[in-house]
Amino acid sequence: MATHELDCRGLNCPMPIVRLSQAMRKLTAGDVITILADDPAFRADLEAWVRRFGHRVDSFENPEGRLQRAVVTKNS
């Protein structure tokens, strides 16, 4: 299991999910990726994306108001 980070700050919908999709193609099952984003639509987009592709959101935080931090595990 490897851990990765993806900084999507400053990107608007749909770019955080596009970048996440591109990054996930390079990972193997069980790898974990942390995504930083400040797009207000990111959480809803992320939840829809993981339902569609079967990955898992391990945590979601919004500690600084606008900055969101999600940890996602890649499934098969």
Image (spheres, rainbow, N blue to C red):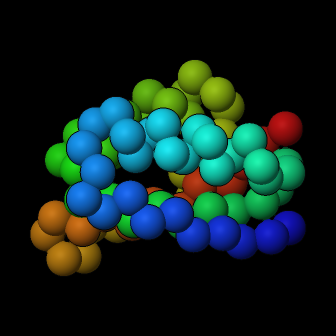
On screen, residue 29 above or below 31: above
Outermost residue toward the top?
52
- Quadrant, the N terminus: bottom right
Decide if residue 56 is on the left or right side of residue 6.
right
Give the residue displayed 37% in from the left and 40% down from the top: 15
Q: Nearer the viewer, residue 59 or 3?
A: 3
Answer with left or right where residue 12 lies relative to residue 58.
Answer: left
Residue 21: x and y in percent read: 59, 39
Q: How many marks?
A: 0
Question: Residue 13 sits in which quadrant?
Answer: top left
Task: List x then y, in percent, for residue 55.
Answer: 66, 40
Q: Is residue 39 left or right of residue 20?
A: left
Return the residue nearer the eye: 33 or 10: 10
Measured along the vertical axis of the image, is residue 16 above or below residue 61? above
Examine the rendering and report whether any part of residue 22 can be seen.
yes
Residue appearing at x 50%, y 31% in the figure: 49
Quadrant in the picture for the C terminus: top right
Q: Nearer the viewer, residue 44 or 35?
A: 35
Would residue 44 be visible to someone looking at this image? no
Q: Residue furthest left?
A: 65
Q: Residue furthest bottom?
A: 64
Residue 20 in picture, x, y percent from top left: 54, 46
Residue 41 at what x, y percent from top left?
A: 23, 40
Residue drawn at 67 percent across, 31 percent down: 54
Answer with left or right where residue 24 lies relative to residue 76.
left
